[in-house]
Amino acid sequence: MVAIKRVIDYAVKIRVKPDKSGVETSNVKMSMNPFCEIALEEALRIKESGRASEVVAVSAGPAQCVDTLRTGLAMGADRAIHVEFPGTLYPLSIAKILKALVDAEKPGLLLLGKQAIDDDCNQTGQMIAGLLKWPQGTFASKVVLDEENKVATVDREVDGGLETLCLDLPAVITTDLRLNQPRYATLPNIMKAKSKVIKKLTPQDLNVEIRSDLEVVQVTEPPKRKAGLILSSVDELIDKLKNEARVL
Ligand code: AMP
């Protein structure tokens, strides 16, 4: 199972709403979160290597999440589940929704992006692993599954280099940038995806109560950075570091 989130496209310049209640999302291009594309690509490769029988893409959020799920189906997912909720969903609510879906679907592996590029929370994978009491391998840059022994070997990108973990399956894995290069959906697959099934559910169907423990007080743009300077010599640089920045 792969959790995919619909976010503002990475190439869009984010604008804060005039009333500072959030960022502008109307008439803005939305796409699949890039780390979720990587998670889906990894799931597809696992299936193509014969180590999984099916890839199920799941997404929670407003009605338009269906477009993102269709993209996932066009990339190669077999079926999709949309948990429709019009309001804001924070990581703990998503983790509870995913837990209910895992309990129902019983996947052998749950893949997520390491973070969503809209809120940069980097929490959902860790929370769902905690709720499920499953082992977790976060920031994965390499995943090797051993079906026979029911273990996954995960290389993780950590501050000092790479850490290798051996996880008992089922497990939660969150994907980092260098894990793979996601495929593009081809036109025939986009056409085929139109007839694949997207099951619709609500949090109530899953007995999940959505509570918001967070309140967004205000969203503001970061302060504008001053333009840089091009210096003509090392002497000039040293002079500025000594007399202006006063760091030498
Ligand atoms: P976050 O903890 O918000 O940075 O998100 C990390 C990952 O959790 C994402 O890359 C997705 O795999 C998953 N996720 C977060 N929000 C959703 C959502 N609304 N629907 C499905 N998956 C989600």
Image: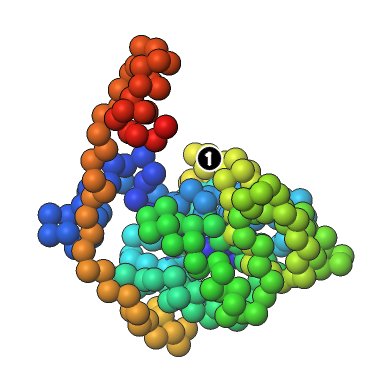
Callout 1: few (<14), some (14-19), or many (20+) C-alpha neighbours within 10 Å?
Answer: few
Note whether residue 210 is visible. yes
Q: Position of residue 160 (x, y in %)?
A: 66, 49
- Say above or below: 93 vs 191: below
Q: Nearer the viewer, residue 243 or 225?
A: 243
Which structural element holds mark 1? loop
Query: Is ligand 1 within 8 Å of the beta carbon of the residue shown at mark 1?
Result: no
- Say above or below: 102 vs 28: below
Note whether residue 28 is visible. no
Query: Amino acid under label 1?
Result: Tyr
Q: Residue at x 33, y 65 (%)?
A: 63
Q: Position of residue 185 (x, y in %)?
A: 52, 42
Farthest residue, direction left: 19
Q: Nearer the viewer, residue 2 or 18?
A: 18
Q: Identify the residue position indicated by label 1 in the image.
A: 184
Q: Position of residue 10 (x, y in %)?
A: 39, 44
Quadrant assignment, res 201: bottom left
Q: Is residue 18 left or right of residue 180?
A: left
Q: How was this image coloured? A: rainbow
